[in-house]
Image: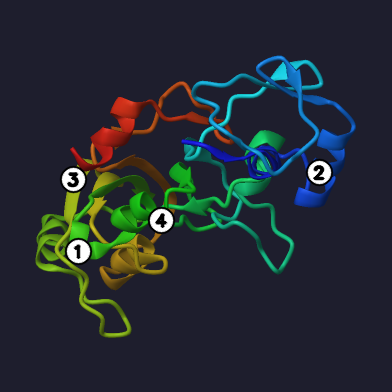
Amino acid sequence: MANRLDKILSTMGYGSRKQVKELVKSGSVTVDGEVIKDSSIHVDTNVQNVYVNGEKIEYKEYVYIMMNKPRGVISATEDEFGHETVIDLLDDRYQGYKLSCAGRLDIDTEGLMIISNDGQLVHSIISPKKQVVKKYYCIVENVITDKDMREFEKGVVLADGYKCLPARLEKISDKEAFVYITEGKFHQIKRMFYARRNNVRYLKRVQIGGLELDAELDTGEYRELLEDEIKKIFG
């Protein structure tokens, strides 16, 4: 698919449209070996080779990123209070894309984040109607009981009276469990355990749909998703 050259270059972090225009005018950009001076031309990077200062660019209309979010980082594109965001952790080549987080994690929660500029995919992941299951590993303060598991399955009633959708609580040990939910209310898992007179000490999202967090990614690391991995989310 052909796009304007200035859009492609600004998306890839080469500056604003005005800055890209000056870059192109300087003779730094070639398309199929020809120096280009008009930044408004349309280019199809699938069939044409675009070079900036001798370096070939690889343009993608959509990007899909898996990140292992660390504690202390906000899962948002920006933060008015100056906290570091997941977008801040990304390389400059992603900064031109209008990225969104497909479901948020609390600032002190770690784990799987999907970041993309594909609005339809992001909406499908976070919409309760799509029933995309999110799996979390948690460590809690008190012993998890059989009654806790039954209450999670029925739908825990939070302190404010909201009844959560049915969830699954899979006990690993007395104070460890996997929690599976299909919605994403603010501090939901913490509030669910609090309603059961328990407190979450550690929380990490490890799976969204059929996509598991890559065990090779340390906290703060990320990589682009493969095509078959994107399909796994809803598979």
First-in-chain label (3 vs 2): 2
C-alpha separation, residue under disc 2 versus residue under disc 4:
36 Å
Question: In screen coordinates, is 1 left or right of 93?
Answer: left
Q: Which residue is mark 3?
A: 170
Q: Residue at point 23% right, 57% down?
A: 182
Please tell me in which quadrant of the rendered image residue 20 appears. Answer: top right
Q: Which residue is mark 2?
A: 21
Front position in the image: 172 or 137: 137
Q: Quadrant of the C terminus?
A: top left
Please tell me in which quadrant of the rendered image residue 56 appears. Answer: top right
Dot 3: element: strand
Q: Residue at point 55% right, 34% down?
A: 219
First-in-chain label (2 vs 4): 2
- Mark nearest the camera among 2 and 4 is 2
Dot 1: element: helix
Dot 2: element: helix
On residue 103, the disc is 4
Q: Residue at point 61% right, 51% down?
A: 73
Q: On screen, 188 above or below 6?
A: below
Amino acid type at image mark 4: Gly
- Mark nearest the camera among 3 and 1 is 1
Q: Which residue is mark 1?
A: 129
Amino acid type at image mark 3: Glu
**Residue 210: x and y, percent?**
23, 36
Question: In screen coordinates, is 134 left or right of 111?
Answer: left
